[in-house]
Image: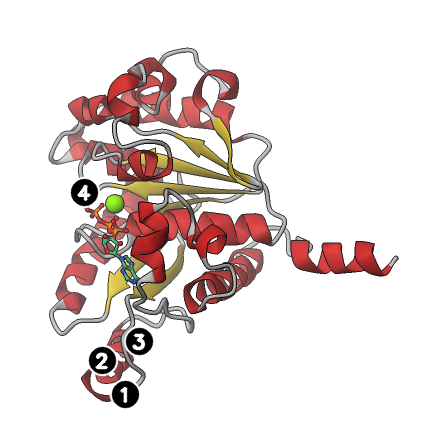
Amino acid sequence: MPIIAMTNQKGGVGKTTSTLNLGAAFARLGRRTLIIDDDPQSSLTQGLLTPDATFVMPPERTIYALFAGLDAGPSELVVEGVFPGLDLLPGSPRAGSFNRPEPHTVDPDHAALFAEGLDRITAGYDVVLIDTAPSLQFNTWVALLAADAVLVPAQAEAYGNQGIAIVFDWLHLVGHVRGRALPIAGLLVNQHKSRRGLQQAVVDALREHFPETLSTAIPDTTDIPEAINLGKPVQAHKPRGTAAKAYDAVAREIGARLAALGLMAGDGKDRGEAEDAREAA
Ligand SMILES: Nc1ncnc2c1ncn2[C@@H]1O[C@H](COP(=O)(O)OP(=O)(O)OP(=O)(O)O)[C@@H](O)[C@H]1O
Ligand SMILES: [Mg+2]
């Protein structure tokens, strides 16, 4: 069961959107999926539940419990069925109290505490996606230490590459501290506007710099903010739209990469195919 951290130190690039919609895409492929809100802004939780959810919810019922080392399991922490096959571990602004700059200097036992709590929650899932904050502080650090791979959502813009280089430096440091490299599941181009002109030139440059760039990009479409506004993944709002299809393709592409790395079984049956097979029988 791979744990994938969704990370970029840049804000507003689609980390949260992609955690939700890629989670729903894996679920549509028949993989039991958990999405974890590890950003103290808690946008994922607020978007899916209610805007005040993280303020009314006791912190002990959220990811805060993992940072605080509380003895909590899935029955206390997991919100089941936010989409068929997709569960949520809610975030909390209180988790931000553990954040520190230079997190690699923090006592490693504290990171281990988070990893142990995470183990209790993630057993039984086929895929786990962790949404992280747009900063490389303690909350993100522990997710990267515990993850099996990282996915870097990014926008194709002329100034984009420099920020991504910082993320790659960070992954280098994480690999050094872990004693083994953290595999990159992919760099995901989001809000792709056009296959022509400057946009495409920037994507091509990105691909040249970072061969990890996935071949599928997520289009810039109002389907995505509309779905967020409805508190749903885009697959529940526009199941046949370009964004839903792109996320399905990304899930397949990442699934294949993770299978090649030995991190995911390559035998997940597409739920659509399974349904077709049942109907035909
Ligand atoms: N493909 C897309 N098409 C149109 N709008 C998008 C797309 N992806 C994301 N957005 C919009 O961009 C905004 C930022 O997205 P999101 O919150 O996922 O970014 P983020 O990287 O998680 O940000 P933060 O760093 O603040 O956590 C959201 O309002 C979302 O609706
Ligand atoms: Mg976010």
Within 10 Å of disc 1 (Cα), the crowding (few <14, some 14-19, many 20+) is few
User: Is ligand 1 less than 8 Å from the beta carbon at label 2?
Assistant: no
Q: Position of residue 271 (x, y in %)?
A: 66, 53
Residue type, label 2: Gln
What is the spatial separation of the Cα atoms under label 1 and label 2, in whole angstroms?
6 Å
Residue type, label 1: Arg
User: Is ligand 1 less than 8 Å from the beta carbon at label 1?
Assistant: no
Q: Position of residue 229 (x, y in %)?
A: 31, 47
Helix, strand or loop under label 1: loop
Residue type, label 4: Leu
Q: Quadrant of the N terminus?
A: top right
Labels 3 and 1: the sequence-earlier one: 1
Dot label at residue 199: 2
Which residue is the site of mark 3?
207
Residue 6 appears in the picture as rendered: no
**In contact (CB < 8 Å): disc 1 and disc 4:** no
- Residue at 40% over, 69% down: 214
Helix, strand or loop under label 2: helix
Check the image and name the residue furthest to the right. Answer: 281
Q: Is residue 240 above or below residue 26?
A: below
Which residue is the site of mark 1?
196
- Residue at 43% over, 49% down: 233
- Please state which of the two labelled residues, at mark 3 or mark 1, is closer to the viewer: 1
Labels 2 and 4: the sequence-earlier one: 4
What is the spatial separation of the Cα atoms under label 3 and label 1, in whole angstroms?
15 Å
Helix, strand or loop under label 4: loop
**In contact (CB < 8 Å): disc 1 and disc 2:** yes
* For residue 168, side relative to residue 251 (left or right): left
